[in-house]
Amino acid sequence: MNTPFGTFSNICRMVKIEHSIFALPYAWAGLCLASKGWPTWEQFIFLTIAMVAIRSVAMAFNRIADLPYDKVNPRTKNRPLVTGVISVRQTTYFCIFMSFVFILACAAINSLCLALAIPALLIVAIYSFLKRITPLCHFWLGGSLGLAPIAGWITASPSSMTLTPLLFFFAVTFWVGAFDIYYAFQDIDFDREYGLHSAPADFGQDAALAVAGFAHCMTAIFLFLAGIEAHLSVWWYIICCMISIMLFIEHKLMLPKDLRNIQTAFFTLNGIISPVMLLGVLLGIFF
């Protein structure tokens, strides 16, 4: 019989809490850019708690919303909600708990973050239903994660906004949109059979790959422009070149008819890009 700790641990594994690495560095980058250096420990801690909490809410809610499809999709048949290791009720309680954690963390940061807490939760929840409506769902997901640098910025500077966090918003939106398109290649036949929408299912493999490639180009452009707007040093542009090379490698790894490299393209490279970007921001600020 599962203990409460065991259940919580299983849910954390279900929502892949370690994948917070995708968005967290962008939130920290926004925080450091707005602070023009190191933020306070309080800002750093509460922002981190808020980011992990809202991502956990988004993933848990998505698992509940997608359960009818996960039950019949061969790729997702071993997910905890499908096998019954975790119940829908337990996941719902987890969702509610983490929502409160997110709201409390926002309240601890400042009044603007608190005011935006509920809208942020709604934005990440809406994604779970967009695949039923539009292939643009990839970029809604991207925009949800793209809020990370804006969240970091308003944590340190709630009374002022510049183009810098907005440029990072678009960079993250296109970056996430591209790798979510790659991920959707795994379910192209399933999506078509069950009337779900994705770029590969709606537009075909070649067109979807072209859209993802375009999105990666836009990612590199917006990162470059963000560095100019933030007056970062030459180190930032060196890092931007490195990121652009990794995006190119990721694109070349994606072969629609051979998805053996999906784990490398989706998880490994993207898990590297975020911390490298943060390193570039810190080098650009301090050196």
Image (cartoon, helix red, strand yellow):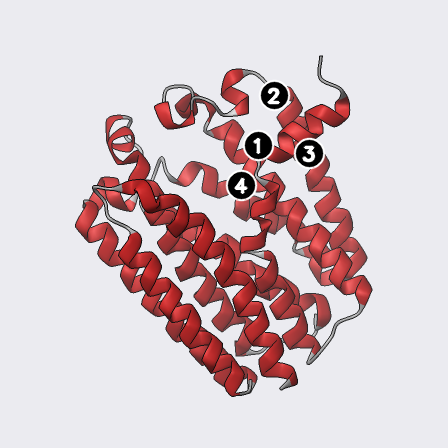
Does the image show residue 212?
no
Q: Is residue 64 left or right of residue 269?
A: right
Cα gap from disc 4 to disc 3, whole angstroms: 12 Å
- The secondary structure type at the circle numbered 1 is helix
Name the front one of labels 1 and 3.
1
Whether 82 is drawn above or below 177: the answer is: above
Say which amino acid is labelled 3. Ile
The quadrant of the rendering that contains the N terminus is top right
Q: Secondary structure at mark 4?
A: helix
Pointer 1 with pointer 2, Cβ within 8 A: yes
Q: Which mark is residue 257?
A: none
Residue 267: percent from left, percent from top: 46, 49
Picture residue at 49% right of the left edge, 42% below the top: 126
Q: In the image, which disc is placed on residue 86? A: 2
Task: In this rendered view, identify the residue nearer to me: 79 or 141.
Answer: 79
| Whole-number angstrom distance, CA of label 4 to CA of label 1 | 17 Å
Residue 284 appears in the rendering: yes
Disc 4 crowd, CA 10 A, few/some/many (<14, 14-19, 20+):
many
Residue under numbered circle 4: 125
Q: Residue at x 24, y 39 (%)?
A: 201
Counting from the top left corner in percent of width and height, residue 32 is at 67, 73
* SS type, badge 3: helix
Count of numbered badges drawn on the protein: 4
Type of amino acid at the residue the image marks with label 2: Ile
Q: Position of residue 145 (x, y in %)?
A: 52, 55
Give the mark nearer the N terminus: 4 vs 1: 1
Which quadrant of the structure image shows residue 158?
bottom right
Q: Check if mark 4's residue and mark 3's residue have beta carbons within 8 Å.
A: no
Q: Quadrant of the C terminus?
A: bottom right
Secondary structure under the numbered disc 2 in the rendered image? loop
